[in-house]
Image (cartoon, coloured by chain):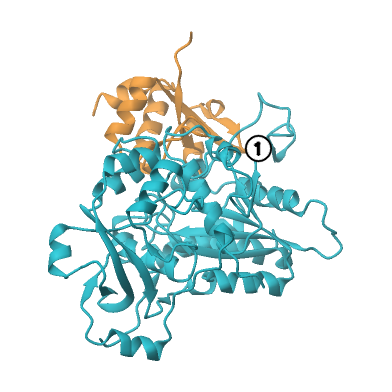
Amino acid sequence: MSLIGHGNKELVERVMPAAEAAARIKGMKAMPVREQIATEIVGLSYGFFSPLQGFMGRADVDAVCQKMTLADGTVWSIPIVLDLSDDEVKNYGVKEGEAILLTYQNQPMAIMEVSEVFTYDKQFMAKAVYGTDETKHPGVARTYKYKDKFVGGKITLVNEPKITPPFDKFFLTPRQMRAAFAAKGWERTVAHQTRNVPHTGHEWLMKGSWLQTNGELPVEKLLTGVVVNAIIGEKRKGDYIDEAIILCHDVLRTAGYFREDIHLTSLTFWDMRYAGPKEAIFHAILRTNLGFTHHMFGRDHAGVGTYYDIYDAHRIFDKLPPGALNIKPIRVLDWWYCPVCAEVTYSGLCGHNKEKKSFSGTLIRSIIQDGVKPPRLIFRPEVFDLIEESAKKYGFGSPFVTDEYLAKRNPVFTMPEMSY
Amino acid sequence: MAEERYPISLWINEERLEKLQNVGLAGMAKEVLAGLKVLEVPCNDAQKDKVLKVFPMAKFDSATTKSIELLPKDVKDKIFDLVVEEKSLEVMDKFLSAY
């Protein structure tokens, strides 16, 4: 099993054995981190963000903003930074050349070897990454919210988070994901990025990308897997709840819409930046590290509003030098409902342009909010039933994110108790 | 050039269908998406902007359908009742005058 990650570098795994960690953290100065940073510590420590070994220093941030690479030239599109206020730097005693224990949920989480404390022009960062400095853009708003100092340095996990149900059985580290692919005998794997409950347009995107990926491989024993890799992270009111997203994807296989031997459901913890083409590159890097060979990109991948052209996220891959990524983009057009063909069909094949009816996740949410059960050709009844069940079990009665869900939902992971 | 119109989709459940049938307006609903019926209430640019401002949870689906979605059900019920009352889909000026 190969453990080579993005940039042809060895997969990063920075997890300290428990006994060593217990001794190492005794008496260390400690600093709490917020949810986003904790999520990114998970990404850094298990190698989701390989070759990064920690939060970026100025040289890497500069290269990302100016050249879409790390300082060493490896392609990278989104800054991974730890921000602090001047007071926090002072009060927690954050100093270059020293280590500090990062805590989450009042428990030790990771050691950071602080290599740099620096400032950076947030407006420049926003414009470089998102192509706009408008605060309406959620990624720009997030950038402006960063506090005034950034702290770079290597991260080592000292306390492994416990993933909570129902997410636990879908969380695989890059090493575990590669082992799962090997166990299934898959030679090729295509990633389906999602933050949505699947309608049949999504289902066919996955089926179409499987066909594209399988290509010339033999078909008597299938050697290609289509793998849902749901992004679980910061939620906005009105989004589907995370539990419904992951469970409804999985039911597509258990209900037989995908064969057991070609489909897997998984997740990655990450707060979407909605950076469109830049986020597409980031997703490609993430899935390279997870061991994927192919990545499907649909219309308006990771976009928001009208900031990006709907196929910007396809075109950006043409601008990369050969060999910059070790994953093949599978570029796909829409699947739509055609009343003449009487089926959900591929817009690259169907000629009934006037009669076709496009549908989107937003449109389906609108139908469900109106209390209407969509037809099975558009939305599988098993998915609809599971949405209702998830609403009762996890969503305080709603399949969509509400204030109550945001306030009372179970955390996606918890930190085990550990003395320090 | 004709002014661009952006529909609000009122999806037809049994209750809404019955109301439409009672006043002889069932034919106003269009069949879309494999038999699913909808009333598409058009908005012009100014009406679209006002809807999105007054109801910030609503979303203009700019990428796929060019329609206004995710209005709360009770808001859509009010628009629907106005359509039935006026026997017309051109109700947005009247609806928005209350806001």
Front residue of A192 and A75: A75
Residue located at (39% from left, 44% from top): A65
Q: How many marks?
A: 1
Rendered view: B47 above or below A167: above
Q: Chain of mark 1?
A: A
Secondary structure found at label 1: strand
Amino acid type at mark 1: Tyr
Can you see residue A393?
no
Front residue of A288 and A51: A51
Query: Residue B44 placed where, x, y %?
Result: 39, 20
Residue A210 placement, left or right of A154: right
Residue A127 placement, left or right of A192: left
Rendered view: A209 above or below B70: below
Query: Residue B21 placed where, x, y %?
Result: 52, 32
Query: Residue A339 placed where, x, y %?
Result: 69, 33
Query: Residue A161 placed where, x, y %?
Result: 40, 77
Rendered view: A17 above or below A291: below
Can you see residue A50?
yes
Bin the neighbour count of mark 1 within 10 Å (Cα to Cα): few under 14, some 14-19, many 20 and up: many
Residue located at (42% from left, 52% from top): A272
Q: Which chain is orange?
A: B
In the displayed image of the protein, which residue is found farthest to the top? Answer: B1
Instruction: Identify the image quadrant of residue A19.
Output: bottom left
Q: Where the C terminus of chain B falls, by quadrant? A: top left
Instruction: Identify the image quadrant of residue A218.
Output: bottom right
Q: Which residue is mark 1?
A: A337
Chain A shade: cyan
Residue A350 placement, left or right of A113: right
Residue located at (76% from left, 54% from top): A214
